[in-house]
C-alpha cells in the first residue's frame, strides 16, 4: 500500500502512519501537492542494498571497499581505536 499524505496532516496522524509503515506500507509525504519524502519500512540492510542494486543506484563487486587514498576526517582519526563506550564517556565530560 502506498498512501500519499500532505505534510500538514502528518503531525496529527503520525502514530497511525508509523504503524502502517511498520506493517510494510510506504507513505509519500507531499507539500502543496509535490512529493518531498517517503516513509518506508527499514527491513534488513541486505534487503535495502539489494533493492538499490536492482534499481541501478548501487554496484558491488563482492569485495571489501578500498578506502586507500580517501581523506579521513580528523575527528574520526582522533577517535580511532577507542571503544564506543569510551567515546560516550568522553563526550559526557
Image: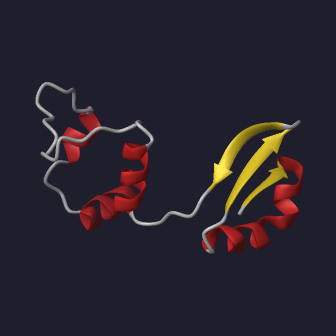
Q: Could you tell me which residue is drawn at 37 percent across and 56 percent down?
A: 91
Does residue 24 appear left or right of residue 90 in this picture? right
What is the quadrant of residue 89 in the picture? Answer: bottom left
Up-down relation of residue 85 to residue 28 (above or below): below
Question: Which color scheme is applied?
Answer: secondary structure
Does residue 81 appear left or right of residue 76 in this picture? left
Answer whether residue 55 is visible to the viewer in this image: yes
Q: Return the x and y of residue 19 as percentages of the image width and height.
A: 70, 74
Q: Could you tell me which residue is drawn at 56 percent across and 64 percent down?
A: 41
Q: Could you tell me which residue is drawn at 37 percent across and 53 percent down?
A: 50
Q: Could you tell me which residue is drawn at 75 percent across and 67 percent down?
A: 17
Q: Return the x and y of residue 35 as percentages of the image width and height.
A: 75, 39
Q: Nearer the viewer, residue 40 or 88?
A: 40
Q: Nearer the viewer, residue 31 or 87?
A: 31
Does residue 25 appear left or right of residue 71 in this picture? right
Q: Nearer the viewer, residue 38 or 14?
A: 38
Which quadrant is the C terminus positioned in? bottom left
What is the quadrant of residue 45 in the picture? Answer: bottom left
Q: Residue furthest front?
A: 54
Q: Return the x and y of residue 53 as percentages of the image width and height.
A: 37, 44
Give the number of callouts.
0
Which quadrant is the N terminus positioned in? bottom right
Answer whether residue 93 is visible to the viewer in this image: no
Q: Return the x and y of residue 44 as percentages of the image width and height.
A: 40, 66
Amino acid at each position: 500500500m502506498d498512501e500519499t499524505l500532505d505534510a500538514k496532516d502528518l503531525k496529527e496522524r503520525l502514530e497511525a502512519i508509523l504503524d502502517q509503515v511498520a506493517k510494510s506500507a510506504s507513505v509519500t509525504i507531499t507539500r502543496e501537492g509535490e512529493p518531498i519524502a517517503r516513509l518506508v519500512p527499514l527491513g534488513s540492510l541486505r534487503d535495502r542494498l539489494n533493492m538499490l542494486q536492482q534499481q541501478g543506484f548501487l554496484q558491488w563487486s563482492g569485495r571489501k571497499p578500498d578506502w586507500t587514498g580517501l581523506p579521513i576526517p580528523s575527528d574520526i582519526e582522533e577517535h580511532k581505536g577507542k571503544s564506543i563506550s569510551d567515546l560516550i564517556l568522553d563526550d559526557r565530560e
